[in-house]
Image (spheres, rainbow, N blue to C red):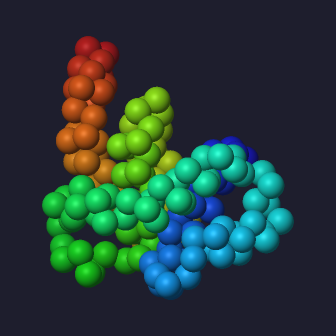
Amino acid sequence: MKTARRRAREYAVQGIYEWQLNADRPASLIEKHLRENDYFVKADEALFREILFGVLRDAADLSKYLVPYYERDAAEVSPVERAIMLMAAFELISHPQTPCPVIINEAIEIAKTFGGTDGHKFVNGVLDKLAADVRADEVKAIRSRRQAD
């Protein structure tokens, strides 16, 4: 069973994807379109709105964080994987209260649902590197606990 937060992230990714393909479409229209889905009521609306509008507002800056970790030309990254990574990058940078493993695991699961065959592996690799950069202390603490176990 999907949590309200997972649904919010999935809808946000769909909105980010739609925006990438239709950059001239207003965010309000994208949001309206997504709300028409019968299951939208099961999503965490506040998280959905924060991610969708935050990513659309900050996409250029978020991309600057992500692109250095791509192991391919940025133009070769699928719009689905890019949407997922933008969503996760936004959360990693803007939601320090959410543990980075939660954000990365959610992104991986969404990539398994919406992305290509091995897209989740690419997403995981990029986000692990980004997390080590933008949340260095948290990542170090997690690694230390794992080594101690």
Determine the image quadrant of residue 25. bottom right
Query: Which residue is most to the top?
Result: 148
Tell whether 100 sits left or right of 129.
right
Q: Judge whether 77 appears above or below 147 on screen.
A: below
Q: Judge whether 26 appears above or below 110 on screen.
A: below
| Residue in the image at 19% along x and 59% along y | 69
Q: Position of residue 27 (x, y in %)?
A: 58, 71
- Label total for image: 0
Q: Position of residue 108 (x, y in %)?
A: 45, 54
Determine the image quadrant of residue 95. top left
Determine the image quadrant of residue 146. top left
93 or 115: nearer the eye?
93
Q: Judge whether 81 appears above or below 95 on screen.
A: below
State the quadrant of the C terminus: top left
Q: Position of residue 144 (x, y in %)?
A: 24, 20
Query: Which residue is most to the right?
Result: 38
| Residue in the image at 27% along x and 21% along y | 141
| Residue in the image at 55% along x and 50% along y | 50
113 or 135: nearer the eye?
135
Q: Is residue 98 visible?
A: yes
80 or 66: nearer the eye?
66
Q: Is residue 108 visible?
A: no
Q: Position of residue 99 (x, y in %)?
A: 43, 32
| Residue in the image at 23% along x and 75% along y | 74
